[in-house]
């Protein structure tokens, strides 16, 4: 499970760090960048704190981390009042990364958590809240092997999830366990076949993008059916397929990042900011739940 959660962090961190903002660099203002992902059934998240950098400087967390922060996460009751407060301490080995003092507590689905950050040496005050999605549970039997691009598309049936804010939003992450050039599916092989220095590592983990309610089928028993998109398969062979239910904060970051990459749908010079849902800074304090299945994608006959 640790490998799966690491892959989730990798995907979402990429969305955060490589998004573009329309800040006026002639009037550059430094912002505190927050990054933390609460996962249902896992320990409280680590919180990463850094600062932004001017557009002409290369961003590096190791160069921009922030120390001397006081970090608290509060579990709120149904009335929005504090129920339990969790203190954090800065890592002695990784400056700028803050860890919960209590590691035994597990994040609860359908609960709301509030992040508060102040500093001993700067005036910034950061706050954000997230409501954790209901626990994702795959309930159907998954075939050991699926023929790539066959009529029998991989189907994943989830137990009926309870809604938190508005509609449920899902993301598929695929993690190849047999990454090799010879195992690349045709679409991804066509991307790299003319490259001299081939690096296939960026395709080991693939994300489907957001899957909203309009893209899945409710079944009579209350479960929901999701059909895994073939574009998510980069490698033949054994793969982990992670089904994620993401909260509103993560959905906003991913959705607004997709708009930034909208090409001709944007007016010239118009690149909207990412939606952060962080008061006093930028970044993401979000939550998700996940379940993982294992299957093999085989070559067509």
Image (cartoon, rainbow, N blue to C red):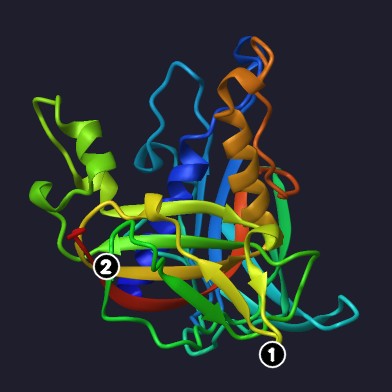
Residue 231 falls left or right of residue 236: right
Q: Is residue 136 above or below residue 301?
A: below
Q: Position of residue 137 (x, y in %)?
A: 53, 84
Residue 56 falls left or right of residue 191: right
Which comes before the other along the chain, label 1 or label 2? 1
Q: Position of residue 36 (x, y in %)?
A: 54, 60
Query: Mark 1 or mark 2: which is in front?
Result: 1
Q: Is residue 230 above or below residue 31?
A: below
Q: Quadrant of the C terminus?
A: bottom left
Disc 2 marks which residue? 239
Q: Is residue 220 above or below residue 21?
A: below
Residue placed at 19% from the left, 33% from the top?
192
| CB under 8 Å between discs 1 and 2 | no
Can you tell which quarter of the image residue 154 is in? bottom left
Crowd tier of the residue under label 1, counting other residues whose Cα lies within 10 Å: few below 14, some 14–19, many 20 or above: few
Residue placed at 73% from the left, 81% from the top?
162
* Mark carried by residue 120: none
Q: Is residue 119 visible?
A: no
Crowd tier of the residue under label 2, counting other residues whose Cα lies within 10 Å: few below 14, some 14–19, many 20 or above: many
Along the line of sight, which residue is nearer the eye, 49 or 179?
Answer: 179
Q: Is residue 272 visible?
A: yes
Residue placed at 55% from the left, 69% from the top?
226
Q: Position of residue 165 (x, y in %)?
A: 79, 66
Along the line of sight, which residue is nearer the eye, 210 or 220?
Answer: 220
Q: Position of residue 95 (x, y in %)?
A: 39, 54
Along the line of sight, which residue is nearer the eye, 251 or 73?
Answer: 251
Residue 284 falls left or right of residue 104: right
Disc 1 marks which residue? 221
Measure the C-alpha gap from mark 1 to mark 2. Answer: 29 Å
Q: Is residue 121 above or below residue 53?
A: below
Residue placed at 71% from the left, 49% from the top?
278
């Amino acid at each position: 499970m640790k490998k799966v959660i690491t892959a989730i962090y990798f995907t979402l961190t990429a969305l955060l760090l490589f998004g573009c903002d329309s800040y006026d660099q002639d009037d550059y203002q430094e912002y505190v960048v927050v990054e933390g992902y609460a996962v249902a059934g896992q320990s409280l998240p680590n919180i990463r704190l850094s600062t932004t950098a001017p557009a002409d400087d290369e961003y590096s967390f190791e160069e921009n981390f922030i120390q001397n922060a006081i970090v608290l996460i509060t579990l709120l009751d149904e009335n929005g009042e504090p129920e339990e407060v969790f203190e954090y301490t800065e890592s002695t080995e990784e400056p700028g990364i803050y860890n919960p003092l209590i590691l035994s507590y597990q994040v609860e689905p359908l609960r709301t958590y509030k992040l508060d950050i102040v500093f001993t040496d700067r005036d910034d005050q950061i706050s954000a809240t997230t409501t954790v999605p209901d626990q994702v549970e795959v309930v159907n039997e998954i075939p050991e092997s699926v023929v790539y691009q066959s009529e029998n598309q991989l189907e994943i049936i989830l137990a009926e999830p309870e809604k938190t804010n508005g509609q449920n939003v899902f993301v598929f992450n695929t993690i190849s366990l047999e990454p090799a050039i010879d195992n690349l599916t045709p679409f991804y092989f066509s991307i790299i076949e003319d490259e001299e220095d081939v690096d296939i590592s960026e395709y080991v983990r693939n994300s489907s993008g957001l899957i909203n309610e309009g893209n899945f089928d409710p079944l009579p028993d209350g479960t929901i059916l999701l059909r895994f998109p073939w574009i998510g398969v980069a490698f033949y062979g054994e793969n982990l397929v992670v089904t994620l239910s993401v909260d509103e904060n993560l959905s906003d970051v991913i959705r607004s990042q997709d708009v930034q990459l909208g090409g001709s749908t944007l007016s010239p010079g118009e690149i909207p900011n990412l939606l952060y849902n962080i008061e006093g800074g930028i970044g993401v304090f979000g939550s998700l739940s996940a379940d993982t299945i294992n299957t093999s994608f085989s070559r067509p006959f």
